[in-house]
Amino acid sequence: MNHQILIVEDDPLLRRGMCALLRPHGHALVAAGTVAEARAHLAAGPPSHAIVDLNLPDGTGADVVREIRGRGLPARVMILTGSPDADLVAAARALGVDAVVAKPPDWNAVVRWAAGPADGGGGNGAPT
């Protein structure tokens, strides 16, 4: 199944790499490097999935998740972070994040997660 995926990552190399990884699977991709860019993409149309870096230059991935959930979007959300800990995972789940994944991720797991159904928000997604 093909999905509309929002990728929010401030590292341009990693952002382009995620797009290159997911594009061959037929997904429509929009990419942002900041919270502001992510908000602009969300205003233009709802994604079915979002892969969001935790640390961004103008805020955090939590800001993006709050925007997604505040708009009532059922998108599946994955947070990428260099330092996942139990407190972060609990806080992310409370926001409605479906998966918290350590960098560097298992890219095959990311591809499988992105292929999953677009009914997120319950914290019932892929690997944490």
Image (spheres, rainbow, N blue to C red):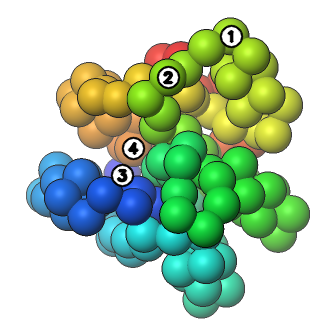
Residue under label 2: 83
For marks 2 and 1, give the one nearer the viewer.
2
Q: N-terminal of the two: label 3 or label 1?
A: 3
**Residue 74 in the figure: left or right of residue 8:** right
- Tell me the element at label 3: loop
Viewer-nearest of discs 3 and 1: 1
User: SS at mark 1?
Assistant: helix
Q: Position of residue 32 (x, y in %)?
A: 43, 72
Q: Nearer the viewer, mark 2 or mark 4?
A: 2
- Residue drawn where x is 73% and y is 58% of the image: 63
> Looking at numbered disc 1 in the image, what kind of residue is underneath it?
Ala
* Residue matched to label 3: 1
| Residue shown at 49% from the left, 23% from the top | 83
Q: What amino acid is found at the position of numbered circle 4 in the picture?
A: Ala
Give the residue at the far top of this rendering: 86
Residue 6 position (above or below residue 118): below
Assign a secondary structure to mark 4: helix
Occupied quadrant, residue 102: top left
* Neighbour tally class for label 4: few under 14, some 14-19, many 20 plus, Cα within 10 Å: many
In front: 8, or 5?
Answer: 8
Cα separation, mark 4 vs mark 3, equals 9 Å
Residue placed at 68% from the left, 37% from the top? 97
Image location of residue 1, percent across then percent down: 36, 52
- Circles 2 and 3, Cβ within 8 Å, touching? The answer is no
- Kindly check if marks 4 and 1 are in contact, taking CB atoms under 8 A apart as contact: no
* Numbered tag placed on residue 114 in the rendering: 4
Tag in front: 4 or 1: 1
The location of residue 58, given as percent across then percent down, is: 61, 68
Question: Any mark on residue 86, and which?
Answer: 1
